[in-house]
Amino acid sequence: MRKTMFVASWKNYKVNVNEVKEYFKALPEYSARFNQQYEIVLCPSTIHMETAKGLIPSNIKMGAQDCSAHSTPHTGDISAAQLKAVGAEYCILGHVDRRKAGETDQEINGKIKQCLANGITPVVCFGETLEQYDNDQTRVVLERQMRDSFMGIRDLEKVVLCYMPIWSIGTGFYTTGEYSNIIADFMRKTAVKLTGNPMSANCTVLFGGQITSTNVQEYLETPEVDGVMFVIAALKPDTYAEIINTPFSVKALAKLT
């Protein structure tokens, strides 16, 4: 079901347990003012999730940054069952960093299925390269990624989608809120097309790409983008809260094409 949603990841910026404890010691001062209607998710590094579990405020859900595609023991992997046991309710999959490292949509498909089987909501990222964007291949790429990632999965109401253009992560390039709105609408319609399930139109769609306190309002005010995924602003409690407390009202845009 669509909801206003904020998903933040620390990547591996937090190195030791003391940093994590200090963060959560300061966070309640800010999180107490969060809108209770929002779905707010914070994804620490896996190594810090046990610590975070006992400290994270009750109005923030804990998520993971990745999981294994395997249901059986696999050296070096973290299984969805392990993530669930440590308190993960969400899991980011298909992030740009993982795709750049060679992760395939078939692998993402396996991870999605493992998350769903263990009661974890997958937050699945899709996006195109700069070359694909410049050659007007965005829709072709996204539909292919979604088709292969969601193979055998019909109910996308249980999945969160995130448009994360590869060309906008760590590059200083931004897409506009209006363009993101058009792509979010396309992804929602594609979800229905691929699953044959009209209820898939109710999936939550996020935008992730260089989100800052100065541009987040632009994305939140579009009717098809339900929320954002971000990293840098989440590394300090005050800037994390600044993103989540951004005032916005959804504006109607011109008819989507």
Image (cartoon, rainbow, N blue to C red):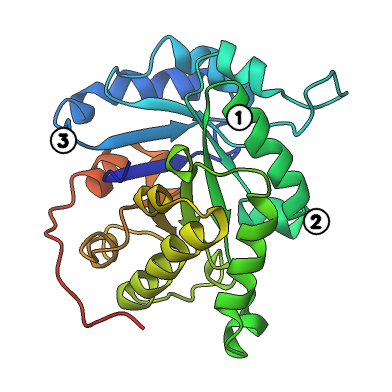
- Whichever of labels 1 and 3 marks the residue nearer the N terminus, that label is 3
Separation of residues labelled 1 and 3 (CA atoms): 27 Å
Disc 3 marks which amino acid?
Asn
Residue corresponding to mark 3: 35
Q: Residue 76: x percent and y percent?
A: 83, 26
Crowd rating for badge 1 (residues with CA inside 10 Å; few <14, some 14–19, many 20+): many
Q: Residue at x 30, y 46 (%)?
A: 2
Disc 1 marks which amino acid?
Cys
From the viewer's perspective, is 57 left or right of 250?
right
- Whichever of labels 3 and 2 marks the residue nearer the N terminus, that label is 3
From the viewer's perspective, is 2 left or right of 246?
right
Q: Residue at x 51, y 55 (%)?
A: 196
Disc 2 marks which amino acid?
Gly
Q: Residue at x 23, y 37 (%)?
A: 38
From the viewer's perspective, is 81 left or right of 246?
right
Residue corresponding to mark 2: 102
**Residue 254 in view (yes/no):** yes
Crowd rating for badge 3 (residues with CA inside 10 Å; few <14, some 14–19, many 20+): few
Q: Quadrant of the C terminus?
A: bottom left
Q: Toward the viewer: 218 or 195?
A: 195
Separation of residues labelled 3 and 2 (CA atoms): 38 Å
Determine which of the numbered discs, if any, sits on residue 115 in the image.
Answer: 1
Q: Toward the viewer: 99 or 28?
A: 99
